[in-house]
Amino acid sequence: MSHVPQTAGNSHADSHLRGMAVCSAGMLIIPLMDAVAKWLSINEGVSPGQVTLARFATQALLALPFAIAAVGVFGLWPKRPLLNIVRGAMLAVSSLMFFLSVKYMPLADAIAVFFVEPLILTLLSVVFLRETVGWRRIAAVLFGFAGALIVIQPSFALLGPVSLLPLGTATLFASYLVLNRAAGTEDDAMVMQVTAGIGGSLVILAAVGVGTAAGIENMRFSFDFPPATWGLLLLMGAFGMVGHHLILLGFRMAPASLLAPFQYLEIISAAIAGLVLFGDFPSLSKWIGIAMIIGAGLYVFWRERRVAGG
């Protein structure tokens, strides 16, 4: 009699383990996309605007055949098209801001500041989702923002407002996640990738067109690059599609409360890529700030899980 529930329990645990493994792989891959984007901007002369356009256009093109294989041509139209296109547009602007920041900031610094996103999501959930958040989580949010200021401060002294771009990225991405809750899981994962890729591409294409006409260096588009540079643009887009798809699959295998802390694995590959490719490595004070951000984020995850469970 006890064999059936034990087997079901083992199957449940196996799914969670697979989800953790898949999500971890995705989190480690995403900073490679950011590293290639930074390389393209500072070494190949590709504008952050064109880098962002390539990232979303490649995502849509690579995801399209997988989406057709999964749901057929007629299944490509999402259940909530406008919401999914808006999601893609928000993600695109968020990515543009981040690619602008990594052009000038060390990769690990930009990603560390971006990690205030769960804290911003906590605040947005209070404002827009009417969720109740106690003083402990509010204190954790403030503690995490203090850590972000420690990471930002040297860059702000050197670069000025540019160093605040990862905060803008985090705010937009948190808003994107709020929309994700509204979108639900009605659509296939690859259909959502295609829709987000198309929505993001259209928004960035318009921005790049205006930027090129206005002579804005960071938004110009050019065809005058060697084949190797175009290859790197495709590689960057592939990293983005694979990384985000693995994360999405992981969250479908295991609960978000279990997987959310794994996002901090991005710091590991970002620090390694920054050191190997650009000679950047966070100073001791920045590691202290990073630890404060991560600690605050982990506490918020733990507290939300405890409140939800009890």
Image (cartoon, rainbow, N blue to C red):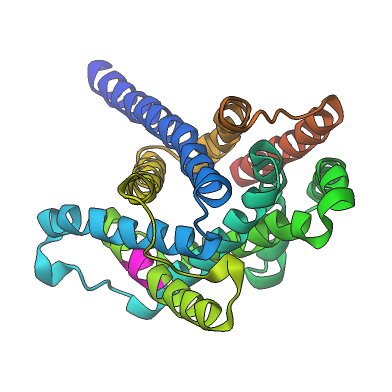
Q: Residue 147, located in which quarter of the rendered image?
A: top right
Q: Could you tell me which quadrant the C terminus lies in?
A: top right
Q: Is residue 38 left or right of residue 185?
A: right
- Image point 56% across, 38% down: which residue? 263
- Image point 38% across, 45% down: which residue? 232
Q: Residue 285, located in which quarter of the rendered image?
A: top right
- Image point 55% across, 77% down: which residue? 211
- Residue 262, relative to residue 194: is it above or below? above
x and y percent of residue 255 in the render?
Answer: 46, 40
Q: Is residue 144 left or right of residue 117?
A: right
Q: Is residue 198 magenta?
A: yes
Q: Is residue 131 magenta?
A: no
In the rendered image, is residue 186 in sight? no
Q: Which secondary structure type mostly characterizes the magenta part of the structure?
A: helix
Viewer-closest of 76 and 47 = 47
x and y percent of residue 50 in the render?
Answer: 46, 63
In the rendered image, is residue 152 in sight? yes
x and y percent of residue 203 in the render?
Answer: 45, 76
- Image point 33% across, 77% down: which residue? 81
- Residue 102, relative to residue 194: is it above or below? above
x and y percent of residue 222 in the render?
Answer: 42, 66
Query: The magenta stretch spans which residues?
Result: 195-199
Viewer-closest of 85 and 6 = 85
Q: Is residue 256 left or right of residue 58?
A: right
